[in-house]
Image (cartoon, rainbow, N blue to C red):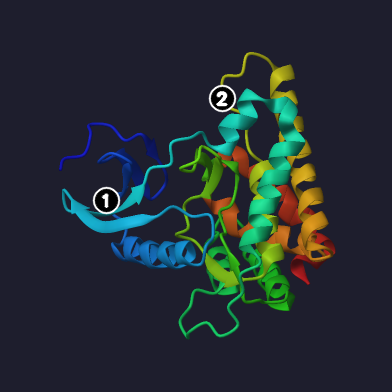
Amino acid sequence: MEISSKPIAAGRTAEIYAWEEGQILKLLRPGFPPGLIQQEEVITNAIYQAGIAAPKIYSLVEVNGRPGIIYERIDGPSLIALMERSPFRLREYAALLARLHAAVHTHTYPNAPEGTTRQKNVLARQVQEAQVLPEAVRAAVLRLLERLPDGDTLCHNDFHPLNVLIGTDEKGAYRPVIIDWESASLGNACADVARTSLTIALGRPPEGLPNLLRKITVEFYLRSFTSAYLDHYRSIAGDSLADLRAWQTVQAAAKVQYEAPANQGMWLEVIDKGLGSRKVA
């Protein structure tokens, strides 16, 4: 079967195409190692079998020399689309996001096999590769990371409203589904929450907004949503976010290299505030 002429969605590493009825194709972009698809298939299958809100996988395929995965199609809007349609339901949607994230973090694997992807190892590599940061800053962040506690909790590592789709089950009830598990690893739940909180709070409003007032309003909304998400997460998970500020510093240093140059200033500010006088210690 041939893919449609245009993808229905696209990300940094892959494109999404309509496939057979009830299915979509996630096709790796040229230039990325094929092993990414195999890794995603193993991770997502394991997560789905564990009863976590993930999409079902049908098969691995190759289309036009590019590896891909056939997923079930979730017919429903993303959580970010619902937020845009009904911004007054901020706390309701923030609570849903927190519940889903906390549910993921109930899955721990203390006896994971050797070679399992470890969150701290991935973060250390990303910080080391962040050439936008001075060497002294990278060194300080790596020292901070070393002091932070590890863990055996399942972490999504890219959990945000765009990666939550709101479908329906056979009875017509709402069925939230978490997508894009390719970055999942075992680690510290607080680190996962830190990345989510920054991704939302520092999200940039769309370009070309009609006036400065609307831009300020959107930024305020995103920060308010983040605060509500953290409040709800704490109400579920208790005092599990004691190291949130430190993990936000590390996550900002790991992610800043992937941000557009125009957006990097806010991420650099998080790092600077988090390190303070320890920056060159």
On the question of residue 259 being in view, the answer is no
Q: Residue at x 51, y 67 (%)?
A: 50
Is 199 drawn above or below residue 204 in the view shown?
below
Q: Quarter-wise, where is residue 43 in the image?
A: bottom left
Q: Residue at x 54, y 60 (%)?
A: 52
Is 147 drawn above or below residue 194 in the view shown?
below
Residue at disc 1, secondary structure: loop
Which percent across, then down, holds residue 217?
74, 24
Q: Residue at x 64, y 66 (%)?
A: 138
Q: Residue at x 74, y 26 (%)?
A: 88
Q: Quarter-wise, where is residue 266 in the image?
A: top right
Amino acid, disc 1: Pro
Is 246 drawn above or below residue 55 in the view shown?
below
Is 28 drawn above or below residue 151 in the view shown?
above
Which percent across, then down, holds residue 95?
73, 45
Amino acid, disc 2: Glu
In the rendered structure, find residue 30 and report the number of the disc placed on it.
1
Which percent across, then down, holds residue 85?
62, 24
Which residue is label 2 attached to? 207
Q: Earlier in the sequence, mark 1 or mark 2?
A: 1
Q: In which quadrant is the C terminus drawn?
A: bottom right
In the rendered structure, find residue 257 and report the number of the disc placed on it.
none
Nearest the camera: 31 or 160? 160
Number of marks in the image?
2
For residue 74, side relative to residue 63 (left or right)? right
Which percent across, then down, holds residue 137?
68, 63
Q: Residues within 10 Å of mark 1 (few under 14, many from 20)?
A: few
Q: In which quadrant is the N terminus drawn?
A: top left
Q: Quarter-wise, where is residue 124 in the image?
A: bottom right
Residue at disc 2, secondary structure: loop
